[in-house]
Amino acid sequence: MRKIIRGAIAVLTSACLTTGAAAAAAAAPAFSDVPEDNWAYPYVSEAAEKGWVSGIGGGLFAPDNEVTYTELSAMLVRAFFPEELSKHEVSEDAPWYAAACTSADALGLYVGVDIRTQHTNATMVTQPVSRYEMAQILYNTLRAAEVQLTPDLAAAQATTADWESVPGRYQAAVAAVKATGIITGVDGAGTFNGTATMSRAQAATVMCRMDDALTYGLNIPPLVDGTEGTVRGEDSGAGTEEGEQASEQAAIPNEPPVDDQVIEVES
C-alpha cells in the first residue's frame, strides 16, 4: 500500500510544486482539444504523461465530457495502486475497464457508494459520477492508501454554504476532501453542489491534487497559477466559459502540516 509522507515537505513553495506539472506538460501527448492556452492543459498533460488518463482516440481528450465511474476508477488504480491491477485477471473480451473496476472494488474504493454492488454492471459503471460520489470514492482512496484522517464536520459545515443539503452518508467524505483541498466548492461561499457531475478535465485536476496530497502531505499550501491565494487548477480560465465550468473557489487551508503529524481515521 502506498503511504503518505507526512510533514517533511510542508515548506515547499508553489514554484517547486508546479515544476512537475510544467515538465509533464512538455513531455505529455498532445490532445488537439486541450491546447496550451486551455486552463486544464498542465493538469491533463501531467495526468497523461504519468499514465493516469488517456484520450478517446483521434488525438482527442474530450475534456468537457462527464467523467464516469469507469474512468475515475482507472485513474485512481493506475495512479495509486498499480500493483492491484496484476492481481485481477480478466478475459480477453472483457471491457477495457474490467480490471480497474474489480481492483477498485477489492480496495474498498466503492464503500458507501451505490455502485459497490454493481461494479460489473456495464450500464451502471459507465454512468457519470456525482460530486458526492466522487468525494466518497476519494475519501476511500485516502483510507486505502493508509492516510490517517478524521474529518472535521464542524469546520466543513462552517465553510460549505449548502451543508444542510449534504446527505449524512456523504458528510465525512465531503469534509475530508474539502479539508485536504482535493475537491472544494463551486463558488466563493464554498457551495459543494454534490449532485452535479465533474468533467474529465476537472477529474484530471483532482488527480493532480490527490497526488500532491499523498506525496507532500495533507493540507499542503495552495498551488498558485497566476492569481495569489488560489488552489491548483481553480483559477485557471477564470472569467471564461471553460474556467467558470471548472473553477472551484474555496482554498486549501494555508497552515502547512506539522512534522510527523498524524491525523487519525475513524473506521
Image (cartoon, rainbow, N blue to C red):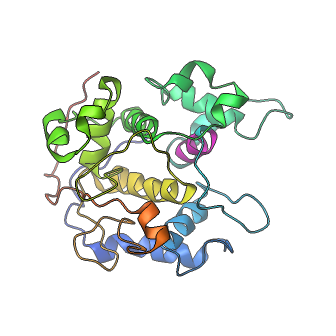
Q: Which residue is drawn at 31% across and 52% down?
A: 185
| SS majority, magenta | helix
Instruction: Give the image location of residue 239, x and y in percent.
Output: 39, 75
Query: Range of the magenta residues?
Result: 70-77
For residue 218, side relative to residue 54 (left or right): left
**Residue 85 lies in the magenta-colored region:** no
Q: Which residue is drawn at 75% across and 41% down?
A: 96
Name of the residue lying farthest toward the top = 117
Q: Which residue is drawn at 62% across and 21% down?
A: 118
For residue 209, side relative to residue 216 (left or right): right
**Which image quarter is the N terminus in?**
top left
Name of the residue lying farthest toward the right = 93
For residue 32, side relative to residue 110 (left or right): right
Instruction: Give the image location of residue 114, x and y in percent.
Output: 51, 23
For residue 89, side relative to residue 143 (left or right): right
Q: Is residue 187 visible?
A: yes
In this view of the protein, which residue sits in the foreground, 122 or 214? 122
Q: Residue at x 52, y 81 (%)?
A: 37
Residue 128 lies in quadrant: top right
**Which image quarter is the C terminus in?**
top left
Q: In the rendered view, would you say 72 is above or below 168? A: below
Q: In the rendered view, would you say 255 is above or below 6? A: below
Instruction: Give the image location of residue 15, x and y in percent.
Output: 31, 77
Instruction: Give the image location of residue 237, x and y in percent.
Output: 43, 74
